[in-house]
């Protein structure tokens, strides 16, 4: 059994219209939401063994905040497949994960985080910014992850954690 945590990046800034989409930073709200989700991960016993993030600035920053607050001490793997290659980019990235890794957090973008969650679980889930889905995968190898091979365990939104 493998566990996949799928997260959409935190709220990003549109303040500079000359900035490319790839280089947009997080807003303060996005940083706070990432920290809330990151702190919730170890409370649920879900600290990842590996973090994979889109190379886009807002996703990288989200992943760094979540990793730190979740107690993850490894390197964050950056890949533009989570930005440019849609759902298949997510599945291709997962297929390369070593079988000894039990729990992976991927931080990416909509509509792809919704798409990969739907493809793996058969359930349509809405992903506002910084939302986190937990999926259990009935496999011993990341290379064998297939359509509807997962079960949606939970979806957590930052606003659910704000008044704790």
Image (cartoon, rainbow, N blue to C red):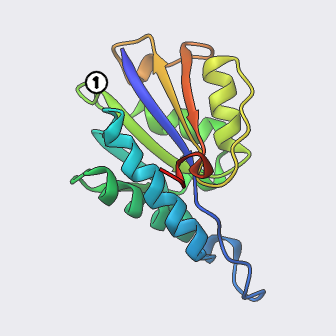
- 146 vs 15, nearest the viewer: 15
Residue drawn at x 37%, y 21% as measured from the top left: 2
Which residue corresponds to mark 1?
A: 99
Left or right of 87? Residue 32 is left
Residue 112: which quarter of the image? top right
Is 132 drawn above or below residue 21 in the view shown? above
Question: Element at badge 1?
Answer: loop
- 34 vs 43, nearest the viewer: 43
Residue drawn at x 62%, y 36% as measured from the top left: 88
Query: x%, y% of residue 75?
Result: 27, 56
Is 125 drawn above or below residue 78 in the view shown? above
Asked if one can make out residue 86 in the rendered structure from this viewpoint, the answer is: yes
Residue 49: which quarter of the image? top left
Q: Residues within 10 Å of mark 1 (few under 14, many from 20)?
A: few
Left or right of 10? Residue 48 is left
Is 86 drawn above or below residue 98 in the view shown? below
Residue 30: which quarter of the image? bottom right
Asked if one can make out residue 55 in the rendered structure from this viewpoint, the answer is: no
Farthest residue to the front: give it: 163
Residue drawn at x 70%, y 49% as measured from the top left: 128
Query: x%, y% of residue 120?
Result: 60, 21
- 32 vs 2, nearest the viewer: 32
Query: x%, y% of residue 22?
Result: 63, 70
Query: x%, y% of residue 72?
Result: 26, 50
- 38 vs 163, nearest the viewer: 163
Q: How many marks?
A: 1
**Which quadrant of the rendered structure holds the N terminus?**
top left
């Amino acid at each position: 059994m493998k566990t996949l945590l799928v997260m959409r990046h935190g709220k990003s800034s549109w303040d500079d219209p000359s900035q490319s989409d790839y280089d947009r930073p997080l807003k303060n709200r996005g940083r706070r939401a990432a920290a809330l989700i990151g702190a919730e991960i170890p409370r649920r016993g879900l600290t990842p063994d590996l973090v994979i993030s889109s190379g886009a600035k807002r996703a990288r920053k989200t992943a760094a905040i979540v990793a730190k607050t979740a107690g993850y001490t490894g390197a964050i793997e950056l890949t533009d497949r989570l930005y440019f290659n849609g759902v298949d980019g997510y599945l291709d990235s997962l297929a390369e994960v070593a079988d000894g890794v039990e729990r992976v957090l991927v931080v990416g973008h909509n509509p792809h985080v919704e798409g990969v969650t739907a493809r793996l679980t058969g359930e349509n889930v809405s992903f506002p910014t910084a939302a986190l889905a937990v999926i259990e995968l009935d496999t011993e190898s990341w290379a064998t992850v297939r359509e509807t091979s997962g079960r949606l365990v939970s979806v957590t939104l930052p606003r659910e954690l704000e008044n704790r």
